[in-house]
Structures are given as structure tokens and as C-alpha cells.
Image (cartoon, rainbow, N blue to C red):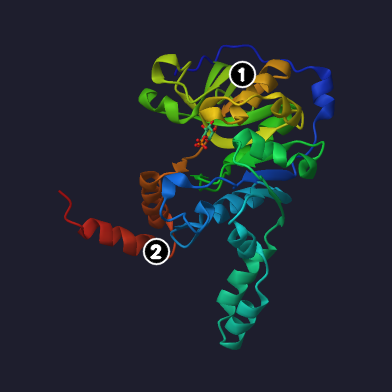
Amino acid sequence: MTIDNSSTTIKFPEQTRQRRQKVRKAVLPAAGLGTRFLPATKAQPKEMLTVVDKPQIQYVVEECVAAGIEHIIIVTGRGKSSIEDHFDASPLLEKFLEDKGKTDQAELVRSIGDMVQISYTRQKEPLGLGHAVLVARDLVGDEPFAVLLGDVLIPGKNPATKQLIDVYEATGLGAIAVEEVPKHKTHLYGIVNAEPAPQPPFGARLLRIKDLVEKPKPENAPSNLAITGRYVLPPEIFEYLAQTKPGSGGEIQLTDGLRILAQQQGLWAYIYEGVSYDAGDKLGFLIATVELALQNEELGAGFKAYLKSLKLN
Ligand code: G1P
């Protein structure tokens, strides 16, 4: 899509400006059954599948920490207890490593548990992403929060979540990360209908959302700008999600709650800076693994040499 830089600066309602609060919390929905990954996910959570040398969900928790989030709420379900164990302290393992003189490894294990405060709550039925976010309502309370989807990995020094927080804290309105996708893939994403609304310091990356639609067929898609799986939202979204009826796939969709938010308050789409890897299906997972292995400080050079040595047809 082309971006028109000539639009005028948008003025924000005064009460929205006054309500602006620091974004301290993040919700990570992790209750899905992982059916796209069977048989790997029959007895282990998809969030714990390893990309290079750590579970997927650790990348997302690290993005939160890098974005300044102080409290993470992970929405889990039955069979997900290894996620809690992973972010817990592990005194036995730490002592074992220290006794063997492996202090670096002991420190690595300890640092995972020390990263950030994490609370857990359960989504008891698989009623959809919007419902999973709604389950975190009490733990979030009356303050803005981020949402990060665990199967989208966005590595890099400038976290997408931080970019959205900057938009929220500057404007008092929610913001969601978007990126262009090929038109024939719109049925895999939430798609936004948005108009350019450039303003400093965000420039042409900032768009005002007119509407959103979850997983439209290419012929019905209002654009090719897809929701990437990073959101910063005001607490009013909970009210709208509570009103949201089942939509695409018979599930309560976050995108449908966002439609109401966009109409009632306004909502930004932000063409974030960075590259996302969709590790949510088997091919995407393999691509994420190769890309992140190539970027890995310890393994990158050796892995690259190996890939170059392959005789591919
Ligand atoms: C979810 C959201 C969708 C978004 C996508 C990003 O869909 O509902 O709007 O574009 O994540 O990965 P899911 O992939 O969980 O079906």
C-alpha cells in the first residue's frame, strides 16, 4: 500500500490524554491446544517447543522485558504446567551445576526465573483468543496492557511491543502492530482497513484504523495489512470483549473486540520496524528455526557454513 504523508496531524480528545498511564503489564495467551503441531504437541505445550536453544515462549517473555514490562500474565490451560516450571526457580538444578563448577550454566538457569514477575491464570474452555484475553481481566485491572501472541517471534534490539507502547504513551490510544502480507494469505490473519495518519515522531508508520476483519478471503480483504500479534490496549477492551459474540471459526475473536474499540475510542495500526517469524505452523517453525539459528551468536557462523555445504537441487 502507498502511504500519503500529507494528512494533517490528528488531535486527540482531552480526556484520552488525561487517562494515559504507563504500560506495565502484558498478557500472553498460551491456552491453545496446538493442533497445527500434532503429534509434537500431544503431551507438551506448543509454547515450549524449542526454537534453536530455548522455548518459543521465552523469546516472547524476553521481548516483554526488553520493552519495560514489569508483570506478565500468562493465560494457560490443562497440560501447560511445564511453562510455569520453566520460569520458576530451580534450586536443585542450580546447586547441581554450581557443585560441578558450571557457574555460567547455573547463572543462565537462575536468570530465567529472575527475569520478571509472572502470574498465571487458566482459560478453562478453548473459546477463542478474545476470550483468553478476557480471562486476564482481573489480573490486569484498570490499566493499559500489552498482548503478545506466543507463536509470533520478532527478534531484534527494538522490540515491537516497545514501539507500540511509545505510540500509546504519546497518544493515549491503543495501537496494534501490522505488516504487509501477500494478498492470497489474508485468510490467515486479522486484516485492517486503515488510513494514513502520519505525525511526529512516528511518521508514515502510523495509520488510523477504520475497521478490522478477522481472516477475510482475499476478495473480501480491505487491504493486505495484517495484524502481527502485538497489541497495546486500554482497559476498556475488556468491556468490548465481554460484549463480543463468537465470530470467525465460532470463537470469540480479539479482532472483533478491537472493532468496537476502534469505533468507540479510536485505534492505531502501526507498521512496526522489524521482521516477524510466524512459528505457529510446521513450515513457519522451520523457517523461524533456520533464521534464528543464523542470527545466533554462538551457533550462527557454524550453521551458515553447514547450510552452504548442502547440495540443494
Ligand atoms: C491470531 C489473530 C489474528 C492475527 C494472528 C497473527 O490468529 O486472531 O488476527 O493476525 O494471530 O499471527 P491465529 O494465528 O491465532 O489464528
The answer to which quarter of the image holds residue 114 is bottom right
Q: Quadrant of residue 27?
A: top right
Mark 1 sits on what residue?
Answer: 208
Is the residue marked 2 within 8 Å of ligand 1, measured from its CB?
no
Q: Image quarter for residue 123?
A: top right
Q: Nearer the viewer, residue 201 or 155?
A: 155
Q: Which mark is residue 299?
A: 2
When the figure is inspected, residue 86 is found, relative to residue 71, above or below; the finding is below
Q: Residues within 10 Å of mark 1 (few under 14, many from 20)?
A: many
Q: Residue at x 44, y 19 (%)?
A: 1
Looking at the image, which residue is at 43% across and 65% down? 298
Residue 254 seen from this side: yes
204, above or below 132, in the image = above
Where residue 239 appears, as percent x and y from the top left, is: 76, 27
Q: Position of residue 43 (x, y in %)?
A: 49, 59
- Residue type, mark 2 in image: Leu
* Residue occupying image coordinates x 83% and y 28%: 19
Residue 134 or residue 109, whichever sits in front? 134
Q: Are marks 1 and 2 in contact (CB under 8 Å)?
A: no
Q: Can you give x and y, in whole percent of width and height, for residue 263 in the image? A: 68, 16
Side of 105 relative to 166 (left or right): left
Q: Is residue 43 above or below residue 199?
A: below
The local secondary structure at tag 2 comes to loop
- Going 80% across and 31% down the picture, which residue do you hit? 20
Give the amino acid type for the residue marked by disc 1 in the picture: Arg
Q: CA distance from mark 1 to mark 2?
A: 42 Å
The image shows residue 166 at horizontal and vertical percentages of: 68, 35
Residue 197 visible in image: no
Give the mark nearest the N terminus, 1 or 2: 1
